Structures are given as C-alpha cells and as structure tokens.
Image (cartoon, grey):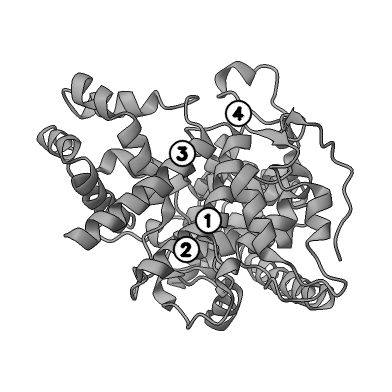
Amino acid sequence: MLRRHKGRESASSSDSTFYQLRPDCAHNVPDTKFKIKIGKTLSVRKWHAAFTHHGSLHIASVLNRIQSGGVHPAIRGEVWEFLLGCFDPDSTFDDRDHIRQARRIQYARWKEQCKHMDPHVGSGKIITAPIITEDGVPIKDPLVLLEAATPDQQASLISTKNGDEADHRLTDKQTIEWKLTLHQIGLDVLRTDRSMVFYEKKENLSKLWDILAVYAWIDKEVGYCQGMSDLCSPMIVLLNDEADAFWCFERLMRRLRGNFRCTQQSVGVENQLQHLASIIQVLDPKLHDHLETLGGGDYLFAFRMFMVLFRRELSFGDSLYLWEMMWALEYDPDMFSTYEESGPATDRSAQGYKPRVKSTRQFGKYERANMKSATNGVDGPVPISVFLVASVLKENSQKLLQEARGLDDIIRILNNVNGNLDAKKACAGALKLHAKYLRKGKKA
C-alpha cells in the first residue's frame, strides 16, 4: 500500500532538511541546487493521484513531472522502486505487497547464508581489518580478532590461545574470496557520506555493510568493488527496510555492474569510455584531438564520473536529483518483466530488448528518441550517463583547449566542476547532444 507522508511542499524549498549535514562538514560539501517547486517537482499529492483505485500507476504523467523538476524527498524511495524496475507500473497494490514480501524473505535467506559463513553479518559489527589470508587461513592477530569479533565473542578471544591454524583453514574458493572482501567493504562504508548526520548512527553504517556483504556473495562474478558503497548509500537513506534497500541497489547494479567487471585486458567501464570518445570526436573534433595529443584519448580521466554517477561532483541531494532525472529519461516499462525473467545479478545490457508492447508515452524521453531512431542494438542504447559526461566536457571545452597542457590539467579542470554542475542543465545538455549526435550519425 502507499505510505502517506507529511513532507512540506513550499513553493521553492530546499531538500536540506531531509539530508542533514554534520556542522563540522558542511563547508566541505558542494551546495545543493535542487529546490522543491510546486508545479514542477513530483509532489506527494501528485504521486498519490497517479495511482488507480487498484494500484496501477499512470507512469507517463510521473515521468513528465520527474523530468521537469525531480521528486519530492518525502516519496523518493517509493518512486525509485518504480524507476529502477522493482515494480511494474501495471501492478496492483496487492501484487506489490506479495512481491515485496517474497523479496524480503529471499533477502533474509541470503543474509542467513552469509551469517552462517561469517557471524559478523547482521551482528551490527563492521569489519575493517582482514580476517583471512588468501590461502584460507584465519588471521590470528589479537587486535584483528578483537576488532572483527562480535561482543559475545570478545571476552573468550582475550583468554583463548591460538589453535592450530590448519584445523580452521577454509578450502572453498568462493567463500575465501567473499571473506577477503569484507574488510574492504568496511573501510569503504566508513568513508561513505561521512558528512551526513544519518551515518552518525552505527546501525545505519551496519545496514550498509550488511547489504554490500550480501550482494558480494550473490554476485560472485563481480563481487564487491570500490564505488559500490557510494551507489548503495542513497538506498539506505531513502528506504527504511533493509531488504527493500537491497533490492533497489540490486536493480541499480543491473544497469551498472558491467562497469565493475574487469579483466587483465580491460576495465569494465571501457565500453562507455569508447562511446564517449566517439561522441566527442563527432561533436567536438577539435577538443577530441587536443585530449588525444595530451595522452587523454582513452578518456580514463572520466572514469570516476561513470563509476559513481557524479556522486563526487554533486551534493548528496543533487546527485539523487540527477539520478532520478536520468532514470526517468531512460525509463523502459519492460524493465520489471525483463529483470524478473533473468534473475538477480545479471546485466541489463546482456538481456537484449523485448518487443515494444506498451504505449510509447510510458517510455522516458531519451528512450523514445532511441526507439524513434532505431539505435537500440543487441547491447541496448548508449546510457544517458555517457552523454552527461560529454555535456560536461563540451561545457568546459574552451577551458580545456586553452589551459590543459597535460593529463593533470584535464583532471584539475574537471575536478573544479564540483559545486558548479547543475543537474537539470546537465540532463538538458545531454539530450541536446544526443539529438545532435543522432542527426550527424544519419548524415555520415
């Protein structure tokens, strides 16, 4: 059922009251540009009015509002569940209650599996030191053991002598690899969104660690990689239930997990970097040639923007605003059924695209443009994030041409984007570049 909220909806109010910053960190964080605007932002009232009596959602009107002015923070979590494909817009209230309950049970099972392999999962404890060697031998350092131990274990550990390590050696490779990631997850969790009052509560940090630990176990191909904590953190903030937050993160990873899949030959985000190079080469050949001359023709300087979707370039609130506009522009109502058929921890790009059976009004503006130009191939369309990065480069083209004399200069200029990037303008710029790129592609 819909949850009723009492969020304020003033004519032009900030969302800073929803994502409070620690006073000692406020000066280190970019200012939030997002404002809640009546008539533009998807309000609590408009959101509730978009559902029929049985619970199906008029997604077209919702997408228009989000593309116009984002989502009111009071309803962001439940709106994101639709944008990310957790639910079908044609589903009823009863359908979603059934799906939600089944997913919560599935998450509890996975979490219990992880807890059986390592009791720190679900204990409220976060591991920040290695607990096992690459050979599967438990680490016996007393300080490490005390840090990683649950409260019930600590007293006995102090008085217990080290046993024979060989007796406790793990032999299952997948379990060893998973345990080796747990302390890295912990270190990253403690660094994630530390400026926020929300993460002063240890239970919220533990929730983030648990979700990432469980995801690392079920997605054995990708596991855990640095940057995932930045993508998962907003889900913890927006959704009270840990299982609901997990499934939103899992759906987001369907779009992005390819970025984290690396081999000895290539980094996972390489396809997007190649798309970016092609776009700049077509739309701004002078800039492309200059970047290539400086040794930046591989566009690796844009790596971070793709991996964490501008989380470092924007305030917390503005990054959420950017994400929801991107997802609304890319929205595909077939997402839910496609994801359900393929199972967890799979790529959206690897699934292909099903025949379009729904009204085009149910698709996002960016997706409709791709459908119209027939650019959806086997791997799907180029993500809008590529055109977002391209719009940032185009916006800073003159500065890069005039001031950049090496890779360090390119990185410095792009780092100065922090605090100056406007989410709505960036999306508008991405759409313009996309349209221009499609037109030039047809002429070529």
Residue identifier under label 1: 329
> Circle 1 sits in a helix, a strand or a loop, which is it?
helix
Residue identifier under label 2: 367
The reply to whether callout 3 and callout 2 are in contact (CB within 8 Å) is no
The reply to whether callout 2 and callout 4 are in contact (CB within 8 Å) is no
Q: Quadrant of the N terminus?
A: bottom right
| Between discs 2 and 4, the one toward the N terminus | 4
The kind of residue tagged 2 is Glu
* 270 lies left or right of 332: left
| Between discs 3 and 4, the one toward the N terminus | 4
> Circle 4 sits in a helix, a strand or a loop, which is it?
loop
The reply to whether callout 1 and callout 2 are in contact (CB within 8 Å) is yes
The kind of residue tagged 3 is Ala
* 297 lies left or right of 166: left
The reply to whether callout 3 and callout 4 are in contact (CB within 8 Å) is no
What is the spatial separation of the Cα atoms under label 3 and label 2, in whole angstroms?
Answer: 17 Å
- The residue that appears at 47% across and 25% down in the rendered structure is 420
